[in-house]
Amino acid sequence: MQHARDIKDKAVELTIKEHDQKYATQSGMVFVPESVKRHYAFIESMFEPFSEEQFAADASEAAAKLIQDFQSQVDELKKRYYE
């Protein structure tokens, strides 16, 4: 998630820099950096499905399903050949 925060921070930084360059000669322009941060807040949520925590949870769930399926196949073979 740090990568997502870095991307968001860079977007905010570049937007502020672009604004400052564009309106540097105009007086009376009010610019609120917090509004820019809120504007780019969605970036972090875009990376959520790829977070390490989510990946670990998904991998654990997949492993549990594989083990369960494997065990059911072993049980079926035991019934077929040993009972």
Image (cartoon, grey):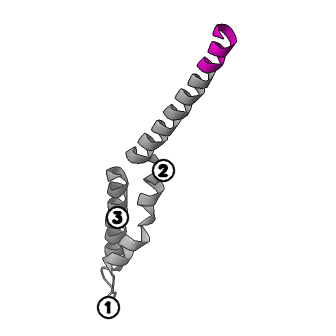
Which three-letter amino acid code belongs to the residue tagged 3?
Leu
For disc 1, the marked residue is 28
Badge 2 density bin: few <14, some 14–19, many ≥20, Cα 10 Å: few
- Residue under the image location 52 percent in, 27 percent down: 67
Q: Earlier in the sequence, mark 3 or mark 2?
A: 3
In the image, is residue 78 part of the stretch drawn in magenta? yes
Query: Most prominent secondary structure in the magenta stretch?
Result: helix
- Picture coordinates of residue 53 (x, y %)? 39, 46
User: Which residue is disc 3 drawn over?
Assistant: 14
| 59 displayed left or right of 68 | left
Instruction: Give the mark nearest the N terminus, 2 or 1.
Output: 1
Task: Please tell me whether mark 2 or mark 1 is closer to you in this view.
Answer: 2
Q: Amino acid at mark 2?
A: Pro
Q: Is residue 31 magenta?
A: no
Where is mark 2, residue-wise? 49
Which quadrant holds residue 35?
Answer: bottom left
Query: Looking at the image, is 74 positioned above or below residue 48?
Result: above
Q: Earlier in the sequence, mark 3 or mark 1?
A: 3
Q: Residue at x 35, y 80 (%)?
A: 23
Q: Give the label, 3 or 1, closer to the camera.
A: 3
Q: Relative to residue 46, is residue 22 drawn left or right?
A: left
Estimate the x, y position of residue 15 in percent, counting from the top left. Answer: 37, 68
Is 73 placed above or below 33 here?
above
Depth check, mark 3 against mark 2: the one in front is: 2
What segment carries the magenta color? Answer: 74-83
Per the image, label 2 sits on a secondary structure element best described as helix
Q: Is residue 35 above or below residue 66?
A: below
| Residue located 41% across and 59% down the image | 44
Question: Helix, strand, or loop for circle 3?
Answer: helix
Q: Residues within 10 Å of mark 1 (few under 14, many from 20)?
A: few
Q: Residues within 10 Å of mark 3 (few under 14, many from 20)?
A: few
